[in-house]
Image (spheres, grey):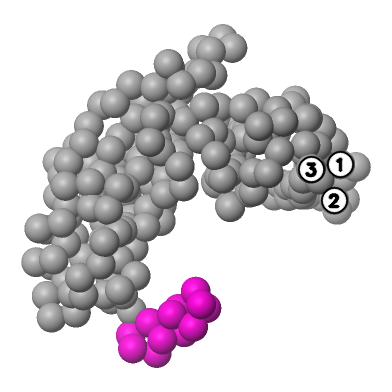
Amino acid sequence: ITLVNLWKVQREVRAEVYVLGSGGWGVPTTAMTEIELQYAATFFAKMLPPVHGKVFVVTGFGYTLGLDLATATFVMLQLPAGVRYNYMLSSVEGSGIYLVTADRFQLSVWLHRMTGDNHGAGGWLLVDTFSVLEACARLAGDSWVPCEYLNVAAVGDNADFVFLDHPSSGVIFSVHLNSRVVKKVYQRTADEHECRSVAVR
């Protein structure tokens, strides 16, 4: 088990990485970086699951901040144009990262080959884009509530599939990205939906 403690004070970002072994938590390794002044007001929305030994943080600007767990060093990865918050990352077999994002009901899949020190936005290649609106509305049936967006909840390795959350209807969908097959995998109950609504407020 690896525990990452991350915090930011103005431009300075610090991290502590703890690894749980047979003797308990080991001595943490630490990392520190300063972000550019233009990004000083950024916020950290959430930490994504590890990809190729790195954890990435969704920020309030057009980049994701990565932490290499082995070397305790930071890397700033620019995001594709127009991508801000609603995305998840997935490892590519060998080397690289997939990014899956949803703009309302339009899914886009991007590929970034992580080679050398090229972490710029120019490294992103759009490999697929399609709409799931019709399929989601049909599968949700009577529980469908018009809503302008889907949340990207999780992405499988090699971007094989994605789980999408439709908050208004309380439905979780899975999408097999290669075949574009959409399935309804979970329907929140009224109690679950009410608790979620209260929590969001």
74 to 88, vertically: above or below: above
Q: Between residue 183 and residue 31, name the one nearer to us.
A: 31
Read off the residue under disc 1: 28
- Write down the quadrant of residue 130 in the picture: top left
Whether the magenta-drawn stretch holds residue 192 is answered as: yes
> Contact, CB < 8 Å: mark 3 with mark 1?
no
Classed neighbour count for the residue bearing mark 2: other residues with Cα under 10 Å, few (<14), some (14–19), many (≥20): few
State the separation of the CA atoms marked 1 and 2.
8 Å
Q: Main secondary structure of the magenta part?
A: helix
Residue, x 41% and y 86% (percent of image)?
A: 194
Classed neighbour count for the residue bearing mark 3: other residues with Cα under 10 Å, few (<14), some (14–19), many (≥20): few
Residue, x 28% and y 38% (percent of image)?
A: 108
> What amino acid does circle 1 point to?
Pro
> What amino acid does circle 3 point to?
Gln
> Contact, CB < 8 Å: mark 1 with mark 2?
yes
Residue 125, how many percent across, how many down? 33, 21
Mark 2: which secondary structure? strand
* Stretch of the chain drawn in magenta: 189-201
Read off the residue under disc 3: 10
State the separation of the CA atoms marked 3 and 2.
29 Å
Whether the magenta-drawn stretch holds residue 180 is answered as: no
* Residue found at the very far bottom of the displayed protein: 191
Mark 1: which secondary structure? loop
State the separation of the CA atoms marked 3 and 1.
23 Å
Q: Earlier in the sequence, mark 3 or mark 2?
A: 3
Q: Nearer the viewer, mark 1 or mark 2?
A: 1
Q: Between residue 144 and residue 173, name the one nearer to us.
A: 144
124 to 34, vertically: above or below: above
